[in-house]
């Protein structure tokens, strides 16, 4: 099983981005828009067999889990 994919919502100047494996992707006007995009990415990852989670940063800069997705295997 592959490791868990982690998408982190981060502030990027006046915008919001999704950090993934050390890279920042996208520029969203609101945190909610970035969260929705990260959710789509995590659901797609789960759809092809990966565990994935979406995280945000708290006021102290610590990551906390927003959502978690797991693959669904047909029996």
Image (cartoon, rainbow, N blue to C red):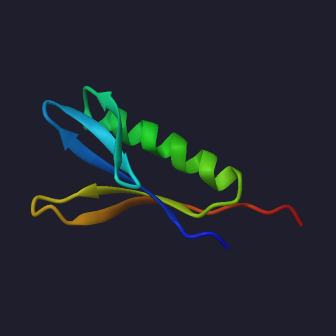
* Left or right position of 39 against 49: left
Indicate the position of residue 18 as horizontal and vertical percent values: 35, 43
* Left or right position of 57 against 53: left
- Residue 29 falls in image quadrant: top left
Q: Residue at x 42, y 38 (%)?
A: 36
Q: Is residue 68 above or below residue 39?
A: below
**Nearer to me, 4 or 32:** 4
Indicate the position of residue 23 as horizontal and vertical percent values: 35, 46
Q: Is residue 73 above or below residue 29?
A: below
Indicate the position of residue 41 as horizontal and vertical percent values: 53, 43
The N terminus lies in quadrant: bottom right
Q: Residue at x 58, y 48 (%)?
A: 43
Indicate the position of residue 37 as horizontal and vertical percent values: 44, 37
The extreme right residue here reads: 75
Q: How many marks?
A: 0
Q: Residue at x 71, y 52 (%)?
A: 48
* Left or right position of 48 against 52: right
- Residue 55 falls in image quadrant: bottom left
């Amino acid at each position: 099983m592959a490791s868990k994919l982690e998408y982190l919502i981060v502030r990027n100047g006046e915008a919001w981005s999704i950090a993934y494996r050390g890279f920042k992707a996208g520029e969203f006007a609101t945190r909610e828009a970035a969260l929705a995009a990260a959710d789509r990415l995590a659901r797609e990852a789960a759809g092809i067999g990966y565990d994935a989670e979406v995280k945000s940063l708290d006021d102290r800069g610590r990551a906390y889990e927003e959502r978690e997705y797991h693959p669904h295997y047909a029996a």
